[in-house]
Image: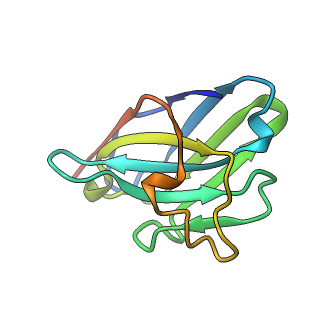
Amino acid sequence: VQLQASGGGVVQNGDSLKLVCAGTGRTFDSYAMAWFRQAPEKEREYVAAITWSGSDRFYADSVKDRFTISRDNAKNRLYLEMNNLRPEDTAVYYCAATRGVLGPLGHLAPLRTTYNEWGQGTLVTVSS
């Protein structure tokens, strides 16, 4: 599967934004997927993940209760709805996919090595 993220932009502190990751290929629904982000001069960090069916979702503590990951397999789309954005959310956001598992409690979800397909990033800038 090939992935392309979009939807980034410049927003104000407290605003909302929705990112979209479009997948190509007929096997999109066989992939577990995730969002990661990378701020300037920082390591790429995990944001959220979702199983292939969408039945299970996992979040980093820093975004829990503010961000929602979802997918529409009929449209080959992965989404990240971001609410109450903060300046520290400023980063390039990447979508990623794996045909492997995320683990019963999602313990593999935060690991970059879990994913073998990555899209190009989309920049989100939150001004204070």
Q: Position of residue 51 (x, y in %)?
A: 72, 57
Q: Quadrant of residue 30?
A: top right
Foreground residue among 6 and 105: 105
Q: Is residue 15 left or right of residue 126?
A: right
**Quarter of the image where one finds residue 59:** bottom right
Which sits in the foreground, 127 or 119? 119
Please, is residue 114 above or below residue 60 in the view?
above
Query: Number of numbered discs present?
Result: 0
On-image quarter of the N terminus: top right
- The residue under the point 75% across, 35% down is 28
Say whether residue 4 is left or right of residue 90: right
On screen, residue 68 versus residue 77, left or right, reads left
* Residue that extends furthest to the right in the rendered view of this protein: 74
Q: Nearer the viewer, residue 92 or 14?
A: 92
**Is 79 situated above or below 63?**
above
Q: From this view, report whether residue 61 is shown above or below residue 10.
A: below
